Amino acid sequence: MKTLFAVVMATSILFAVSYPEPEEGSKIDSKLIQVKVELVKDDNSTVTLLDGNEYVEIKSDSNATAISDTIHKNLPESGIYIGVRYTVNKIKTKAQIVLAGTTYYTLDTSVNSGESWDLSTDPTKKDYTTMTPSFTDENYVKFTKPLVISNADATIYSVSKFSKNIQLEWTDFAPEHIHWIGEEQIFTGILSQEPKKEINFDINYTKGSSWKSNKLTILTDGNYSILGAHMSRPSMYALNGSFFKDGKDTEGGYEIDIHKADNSNSFFRINVDINCSGGTYTLNYLYLHPTENTNTNPGIVSDEGYTLNTNGSVQCKDITY
């Protein structure tokens, strides 16, 4: 297995509602996940690569290959696999956040998702906060090209890319109302082939003078055929997209399904034309399935009333190792 890692700086984003940004000195020391990972065959039978009982590091650069090493050791001897299924059981975070000049530290506590985290100003108490999802956080990712394993001879690719953008989620502005501390994930996933090219663009949507933004990252082979994608969420006010679900090449670009992070039964469907030579993209439609279907009327239909900006700039670049 080959593991690819990169760190990029986040772009500046303007949000409709403004909470204080974490100040200099804020950092995430470590993030561990307890995750079950299964390869899926075309008859829907599975082979378990991670059993979901142990914690593996996903954040710290020094331990960044933990998932890859474990998966590689557990690869089956042979078979044709059409996808991979992730089931996240728990997430541990050790971090410090600076707000209004005061540093707050995570504690050795356990919470459910959406519950406020206990924080302390005593650095000697800094430890992991363990968060349990309030629902079964299961994501199925379909390989755009099947993974063929013969006599345990195969290479699959674990890709992880974070920004330096510390993310906080609040129910109200006060340290005692923080219920998530993380870093913006630009890409996280397992691919059946080695990615050669990376495509990035911002999905912007407006309501009057307010606007929000997500970043979509697409990884392809050397011929720009899609291998995977990821929707990052720079702010708690952006669309709650996450892992790649499925995708295909189209005449002018791609149709991509992205899991909705807080509901494994829903996903965002994105149809986009990409012009790498001209540095532009055109969004043909983006809608939430199954509750919305607006592919005959491009835009985001929601109670919040935001309108999708259908054109913008795109970056296409070779991946270097």
Image: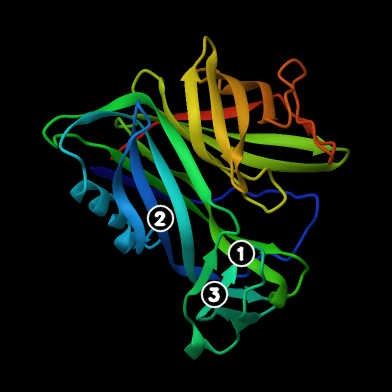
- N-terminal of the pair, mark 1 or mark 2, is 2
The answer to which image quadrant residue 147 occupies is top left
Q: Earlier in the sequence, mark 2 or mark 3?
A: 2
Q: From the image, which quarter does the C terminus lie in?
A: top left
Q: Amino acid at mark 1?
A: Trp
- Image point (66%, 80%), residue name: 101
For the point 70% across and 77% down, which residue is it? 176
Query: Which quadrant holds residue 208?
Result: top right
Amino acid type, label 3: Ser
Q: Is residue 225 above or below residue 292?
A: above
Position of 111 relative to 212 (above/below): below
> If the image is split into quadrants, where does the N terminus sit?
top left
Closer to us: 16 or 321: 16
Q: Which residue is mark 1?
A: 180
Along the line of sight, which residue is nearer the eye, 277 or 304? 304
- Residue 10 location, x and y as percent? 56, 50
Residue under label 3: 110
Mark 3 near mark 1, Cβ–Cβ under 8 Å? no
Q: Going by the image, does 45 lie left or right of 128?
A: left
- Residue on which disc 2 sits: 35
